[in-house]
Image: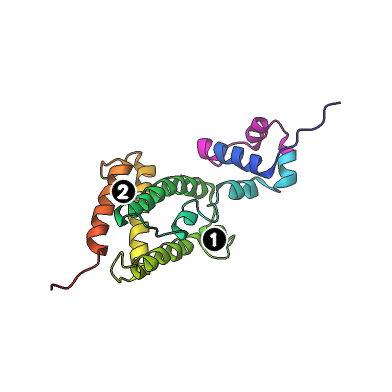
Amino acid sequence: MARPRTISDDQILQTARECFLKHGPSVPTDVIADQLGVSAQALFKRFHSKQDLLLAAIAPDSPASWIPMVEAGPDERSLDAQLTEILEELADFFVDICHRMSVLRWSGVDPKDLFARYDEAPPLVDIRVLSGWLRRAAARGMIRDVDFKATAMLILTSMHGPAMLTDMLEKHPTGHTQSEYAAYMVNVLLQGLMPRHKNS
């Protein structure tokens, strides 16, 4: 007799995530189970309900994919290069997050229930981590002294807004490519963040 297939929680969550993002929260659990080669009952032994599976698969990852890179900086590269890297990472991140949040809203998940899963709400983590990078950049003389949290919020919302609207409109609201928009934002930020030297 063949042994039952053993699958990890990560395999289940990856397949469930793909199914939910492609088909929406109404996708039958049997579809997810079939793709994994197991029964729906096997899924419910790991995740007690479809709602539990949905939240585990679709809720934002903690920490976010871009955070380790930002926490490791700034480094010796130019401010331009580092901001470009950060904004491009944020652009990709928010495309993924906006798609996930659309699925969660469609499923009727209350944002309060979602954020209750975390010790610190992901948006607050994002602000804290990015403001920390800005503070360290200022300490190194790379940028001028600014309100670091407000500037972090400015950067985050400037990348989140277009991703959200692109998800809704199925095209970038300004007509830029993602890379073009990130490059424009870097140019604007450089003008606002560069140290101001006194006239000699």
In this orientation, which residue lies closer to the viewer: 9 or 179? Answer: 179
Secondary structure beneath dot 1 equals helix
Residue 93 position within the rendered picture, expressed as x and y whole percent measured from the top left: 44, 48
User: Residue 29: within the magenta?
Assistant: yes
Residue at horizontal 22 percent and vertical 60 percent from the top: 191
Classify mark 1: residues with Cα within 10 Å, few (<14), some (14-19) or many (20+). some
Percent across and percent down for residue 38 are 72, 33
Q: Residue at x 65, y 39 (%)?
A: 11
Q: Which residue is mark 1?
A: 115
- Image quarter of the C terminus: bottom left
Does the stretch in magenta take in 34? Answer: yes
Number of numbered labels in the structure image: 2
> Which amino acid does the dot numbered 1 rest on?
Phe
Span highlighted in magenta in the image:
20-41
Other residues around mark 2 within 10 Å, as few (<14) / some (14–19) / many (≥20): many
Pointer 2 residue:
182
